[in-house]
Image (cartoon, rainbow, N blue to C red):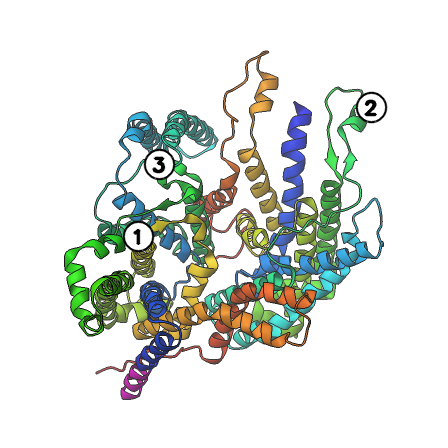
Amino acid sequence: MSAILTRTRLAYLGIIVLLLLVGVFQSWSVALVMINLCLISAVMALGVNIQWGYAGLFSAGTVGFVALGGLAGVLISEAPVIEAWDVGGAGLIYSVATLAALIAAIFIIMSVMKPGTARRIVMTCVILGGYFAVRYFFDPATDAIEGVNPSAQGFLGGLGLPILLSWPVGGLLAALVAWGIGKVALGLRSDYLAIATLGIAEIVIAVIKNEDWLARGVKNVSGLARPMPKEIALQESPEFIGWIEWLHSGALSTVTGDERIQMLRDFAQQDAGTFVKLIYMLLFTVVLLILFALAQRALNSPWGRMMRAIRDNEVAAEAMGKNVTKRHLQTFILGSAVVGIAGAMLTTLDGQFTPGTYNPLRFTFLVWVMVIVGGSGNNHGSVIGGFLIWFAWVQAEPAGILLMDGLTFFMAPDNPVRLHLLDAAAQMRPLLMGLVLLLAMRFSPKGILPEPIRTAR
Amino acid sequence: MFALMSNFVFVPALTYGSQLALGALGITLVFGVLRFANFAHGDLMAFGTMGVVLITYWLQAHGIGIDPLPTALLALPFGIALAVGASLLIDRTVYRFYRKRRAAPVILVVASVGVMYVLNGLTRFVIGAEDQRFFDGARFLISAGDFKDLTGLDEGVTIKLTQALTVVVAVLMVAALFWFLQKTRTGKAMRAYSDNEDLALLSGISPDRVVAVTWIIAAVLATVAGTLYGLDKSFKPFVYFQLILPMFAAAIVGGIGQPIGAIIGAYVVAFSEVMLTYAYKRALMYIGPEGWGPEGLMQILSTEYKFAISFLILVFVLLVRPTGIFRGKVI
């Protein structure tokens, strides 16, 4: 037990040293940006670890849940576009009502009619008719909404609430979708969950990209609200200036007059960015600590023991009267919710919602590598994996270019092979991450921080 | 009206279905013998097709061709060799380790996702992520004009050469595969192994041999499917990655592990996809009275959501009949 404890401490120490090195050799600003993304990655890895490490569920759709969290950021924080609601709100409400009626009709047919050809025919007719009825209200409404000031709005807007609220809402949204998909795919072969989640992720992203009335699709929503004042506002606020004066009083005392004002302005500019990043870091750390504490408590509770029992021997657990499918559904939803929270955090940090950036390599596969390299089933491992793999991911591209440059130094600068290799260095990431995953699974399946072996006390 | 449906619905769906069928057969065979869902199949397709594309370019540069057929057919054996080599190497280095330990299927699935990214990275590293068009040769087998001359009808049915080629090649491949599975010793061994591993081992079937043959067949099918798809549309690595969803849907709909099921499933998926995303505006204009055209495109679903169709079919089958049409393996 103590060996693992030492290892955990060493791993955390190593991460801190790495980030300090980035600060010293690259810049502190880069290090801060990296820390913030590392923290978000750690939250995502925690979510996937709940699914994989606790229950052995393989979801290939993490990216979809990240995107749902991001969508929550828009839906919560953007101001509602009143004009769009005026022109299309009624139509949308009618279409939702029609959809509800259609679903009710399906359930009524299911309970009233006996199974057979007649029921199938009626069902098909009702579904087709209902679908066109929904489209009858839906299409003109969305067209009208997208027509409202399309260069800046053209969508319904959100609720105009503080963006921090979108973090739990993002989690809820992800949990809701996870419930639906888990209901269908769990309880069957383990591969089916992977296939179904892959599908739902593709669909979530397709919807977000194409339904412009919802969140402007690929036109992006930029300038999202912030949980703290903007840098420009900070530079003009007297309190912040006073604070900067105090912080840099040593340097400022050496100069006077206009020079001093200029220097103060420079410091304010520089520090405003750092200040904002530090606030984000604080917020993300708080979220990570809360989720980590909850995850750790869950893992050490009787519930966690039950989950491990199910993971390690499903048949035996079922024989002991545990409802395996229900527990699987529960963990799948919990893990997805954590991923959704991380997605909302990411959108908040970026200050914009860009559906084009949700790519499965970056959000599904990378998080997987984090969990497996870090140590599946160990929450500390997930955090460490989140930090380490994100670090490697960020440094992979410059390293790849450097490597290619070094490999081809003897060629002429305009040699086509050299140019192709330099160009292709950007494609190194999937290859590298795939190799890391395969090597980790083969030679160190327990990861950097293995799951502690618990013995009966 | 008939010509319209044939040109834009029936023939394209048949073509796409044949391409999917070849891919889904590979998935279903790997599933039947190795017992895991191979996520890397789409990228194996891309990898093999990449070989075909590169050799095609080389042949074109040297003026070697078999006009009117596309040069890619000449390059196909090289692509197949590349894909077969890659999958045997991957099996030796990755999957065999887990197979020998009898690891849970989900571990193999995760490993296949790793393989997927390695293959994807290699493909993009060598050929880039952009669109590649490598089709040459005649464009049409039957053009609209020919058809009108031939039949005297005033509507033109067109069949592109790639479409005819796809269907012919697919039929030949499937026939050869079924002959192999039904009649040869190795094919029978494969079916026995898929049916009951322990019993097959007991009767002296070599597992390594069965697994190797399975990978060879899967790689051949994948490369042929990928090449046909690339000839018909274009070659883009990301699109091939996305093709795994309809292929999985096809395999599961038909009953995973069942070769006939994979073929039927592929056509179910392809026809639903094409029929639901086709814009019926022109068709309705033919039926309706003069000057009565519907306003919109009359598309049931926009093309961006074609993956949603495979998914919905998948969900429907999982809910109603998880074993698929032909009672595949489940749990």
Subunit of mark 3?
A
Query: Residue A325's x, y, as percent?
Result: 34, 58
Nearer to us: label 3 or label 2: 3
Type of amino acid at the residue the image marks with label 3: Gln
Give the prevailing secondary structure in the magenta stretch: helix
Residue range (magenta)? A1-10
Tell me the quarter of the picture where residue A414 sits: bottom right
Dot 2: few (<14), some (14–19), or many (≥20) neighbours within 10 Å? few
Task: Please tell me which of labels 1 and 3 falls first in the chain.
Answer: 3
Nearer to us: label 1 or label 3: 3
Type of amino acid at the residue the image marks with label 2: Asp
Q: How far apart are marks 2 and 1 (CA)?
A: 61 Å
| Mark 2–mark 1 CB contact (< 8 Å) | no
Residue at 68% across, 57% down: B49
Q: Is residue B68 above or below residue A337?
A: above
Residue at 26% across, 45% down: A76
Task: Identify the residue position indicated by label 2 in the image.
Answer: B149
Q: What element carries label 1?
A: helix
Q: Is mark 3 on a helix, strand or loop?
A: loop
Subunit of mark 1?
A
Type of amino acid at the residue the image marks with label 1: Ala
Q: Is residue A8 above or below residue B205?
A: below
- Check residue B187 for magenta coloring: no
Tell me: B61 left or right of B266: right
Q: Which mark is residue A320?
A: none
